[in-house]
Image (cartoon, helix red, strand yellow):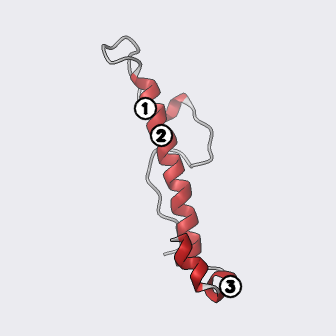
Amino acid sequence: MRDIPQIDNRKTPLQPLNIVHFIWLPSSTPYGNLLLKGMDIVRRIDRVNLEIGQVFTSYVHPSKEDVNNPQQDLLEH
């Protein structure tokens, strides 16, 4: 398992937000602009994907420093 598992939101975590990444929702709804809420969800998923990448690289494929210092690995996870 070499690929970092990611939550699929049709973009990579560091790719800029673009309208093609969202479902079109009308702005004149009784609940407000749902497109903004969708953007917030996509941003949060991007943040989670970045965290998944950090944990995956440090835990599944640790570097030499991480292997020599198990206390740091325990504190990080």
3 or 1: tag closer to the N-terminus: 1
Q: Secondary structure at mark 3?
A: helix
CA gap, disc 1 and disc 2: 6 Å
3 or 2: tag closer to the N-terminus: 2
Say the numbered circle drawn on residue 58: none
Determine crowd level at label 3: few under 14, some 14-19, many 20+ residues with C-alpha closer than 10 A: few
27, above or below 15, in the image? above
Q: Position of residue 24 (x, y in %)?
A: 41, 24
Q: Secondary structure at mark 2?
A: helix
Say the numbered circle drawn on residue 42: 2
Residue 11 visible somewhere in the drawing: yes
63, above or below 17, in the image? below
Farthest residue toward the left? Answer: 30
Q: Amino acid at mark 1?
A: Gly
Q: Which residue is mark 1?
A: 38
Say the numbered circle drawn on residue 64: 3
CA gap, disc 3 and disc 1: 40 Å
Q: Position of residue 19 (x, y in %)?
A: 53, 28
- Residue at coordinates 42% horizontally, 29% vertically from top-left? 37
Residue sitting nearer the eye, 20 or 33: 33
Farthest residue toward the right? Answer: 65
Q: Secondary structure at mark 1?
A: helix
Query: In the rendered structure, are the residues bearing label 1 and label 2 in contact, judged by CB atoms less than 8 Å apart?
Result: yes
CA gap, disc 3 and disc 2: 34 Å
